[in-house]
Image (tube, rainbow, N blue to C red):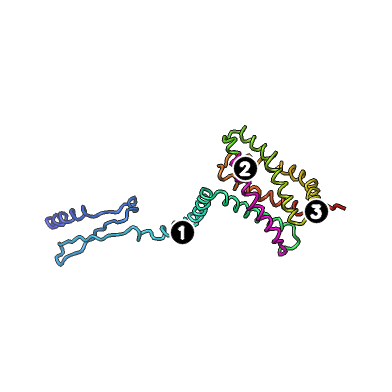
Amino acid sequence: MNSLCRRCGLLVRPVAARINVIPKATVSSKIQWRAYFSFRSSPMGFRIRESKISCQSILPSSRHRFSSFSSPLKSGTGVIRWYLRKLDSHPFITKSISSSLIYVAADLTSQMITLPSPGSFDLIRTTRMAAYGLLILGPSQHLWFNFMSTISPRRDYLSTFKKIFLGQAVYGPTLTSIFFSYNASLQGESGSEIGARLQRDLLPTLLNGLLFWPVCDFLTYKFVPVHLQPLTNSSFAYIWTIYLTYMANLKGVDMN
């Protein structure tokens, strides 16, 4: 009996030596090997077979779970990359279209707030705002922010406050005057009526802008790269334009 046990031990040792135990740390490898026993016709005859196990079959659900989770992130990142490529290849038209779309959204929001019924949108007014963003605001933003980065390329506090001052003293009043005049002329107002409107609405609008735009300009000039500054400015302008379009579409001054 003892001799039989010794023979079985001698046969089991090489078999155990060839068994590959798959540790948990090696689950990431693609192929693992498994050894198993099969008896021959003789009870003392062992035969070892090997079979391949793919780890993809071990954790299939986790792979699909992670891929489905990352797909929205990839799509969002793809849109951002596409927009940045357009900014590099066609900066002028990309900034103009972006400003136009933001002005359309702001005007529709303003109408939703001020109009008595949600279904009575003034599409002609919205078209005017889209044309202003595309033809006037977008190009002017491109030129202005590039000009600011040329004359003052640094981002220290002194340079930033200089840009803010120039924006409030030059760019803001000029664009607001053009906006009121453009909108009033398309509404059929005469030159004297446009002048009276500017006298009535321009100064209050600029004073209210001093409570809003310096903070926006500080964040834009201090932290945002130059090629993204028009987009940031237009994003801030979404809130401001809701107020601005409301002021621009007030009734004209009675000249009688």
Q: Residues within 10 Å of mark 1 (few under 14, many from 20)?
A: few
Which dot, 1 or 3, sits closer to the camera?
3
Displayed quadrant of residue 108: bottom right
Q: Which residue is mark 1?
A: 68
The three-letter amino acid code for the residue at tag 3 is Gly
The disc labelled 2 sits on which kind of residue? Answer: Trp
Kindly identify which residue carries mark 3: 252
Q: Position of residue 119 (x, y in %)?
A: 71, 64
Whole-Å distance between the Cαs marked 3 and 2?
Answer: 31 Å
Q: Is residue 179 magenta?
A: no
Instruction: Name the element at disc 1.
Output: helix
Task: Give the residue pinned by disc 2.
Answer: 144
Q: Residue 15's spot in the image, x, y percent?
A: 19, 56
Outermost residue, bottom side: 41
Task: Give the magenta-colored segment's residue range.
Answer: 119-147
The Cα atoms of the two marked residues, 1 and 3, are separated by 56 Å
